[in-house]
Image (spheres, helix red, strand yellow):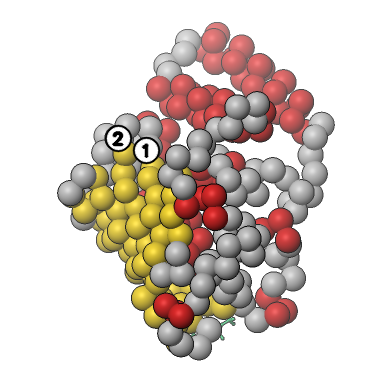
Amino acid sequence: MDITQQSTMPGDIWNPDWNDPFVPTVEPNDAFAELVSAVHEVQEAFTRARPTPTDCAALATELRAVAAKLKMFEVGEDDQLAGHRWDLAGRGQVMAPPLRIEEVTATTAKGRVTVGRFHSGRYAMNGGVTPLIFDEIMARLANSAGRPWARTASLDVDFRAPAPLDVELRVQAQFLRQDGRKRYMRGTMHHGDVLVAEADGLWVELKPEQTRNISERDTP
Ligand SMILES: CCCCCCCCCCCC(=O)SCCNC(=O)CCNC(=O)[C@H](O)C(C)(C)COP(=O)(O)OP(=O)(O)OC[C@H]1O[C@@H](n2cnc3c(N)ncnc32)[C@H](O)[C@@H]1OP(=O)(O)O
């Protein structure tokens, strides 16, 4: 299959606005984006802090109060906002660093990400976080251009240099080829000119019975 012959089908699976690098990550008056940003702030501040035992206890109480409030708004996974806000960096989920995907064509995707101490191993990005970032951008590309849904079957990451914290990293994905249901992808992560990690991945197109749990809300 010649994947370069496929269009990106704007409006179908890919919002053309997302190719504009100047679309702000957080829209004014976007209350959910503010909430996501606040959770990220808590994660980073928690990681950097060394509170006293008394303060730990008080903070735990306050955070449990916040969790109780959020539980009042619990919905099913199809209806939750986290992970479904395709216009936000990181889709509004707070597990992986907020990768900002700026461009997706049928064959390439480009994004940028900055990680703080929350995602640190030791003075460099944790080795488990790098695959999260690759999976996000490579999956986005694998599922772009109107292609039927595919899930990650394998992801092989090579760590070439420590990925520094608090600076912007550039992440790219490339659609190498398709062989039946198999889509072969490649990813790279750079800090400046330094290649910090690269990845090879296989995405396998789902059979109809494997798409049962994928809803319209999963469509970018
Ligand atoms: C964010 C954007 C959008 C996101 C939008 C949200 C929805 C969709 C995406 C969700 C993203 C995820 O959750 S991904 C989460 C992480 N991934 C997963 O949970 C996937 C778990 N695994 C599976 O569900 C399954 O193993 C599949 C679907 C990957 C493959 O199973 P299958 O459908 O039975 O395929 P099967 O017939 O065995 O294999 C088909 C071909 O692929 C090859 N193959 C299969 N697995 C492998 C493998 N690990 N390594 C090498 N090759 C493999 C086989 O040899 C075969 O080759 P040949 O004989 O044909 O040559």
Q: Determine contact: label 1, label 2, CB under 8 Å.
A: yes
In percent of width and height, residue 17 lies at 54, 50
Q: CA distance from mark 1 to mark 2?
A: 6 Å
Residue of label 2: 167
In percent of width and height, residue 44 lies at 45, 27
Which residue is located at x 46 percent, y 69 percent?
106
Q: Is residue 107 left or right of residue 37?
A: left
Residue 1 in view in this figure: yes
Residue closer to the observer: 129 or 20: 20
Residue 101 in view in this figure: no
Label ID, residue 161: none
* Label 2 beta carbon less than 8 Å to ligand 1: no
Q: Amino acid at mark 1?
A: Thr
The vertical placement of 102 against 72, above or below, is below
Which residue is located at x 80 percent, y 35 percent?
73
Q: Amino acid at mark 2?
A: Val
Question: Which callout, 1 or 2, points at the residue further toward the start of the chain?
Answer: 1
Furthest residue toward left: 193
In percent of width and height, residue 47 lies at 43, 26
Q: Quadrant of the C terminus?
A: bottom right
Residue of label 1: 114
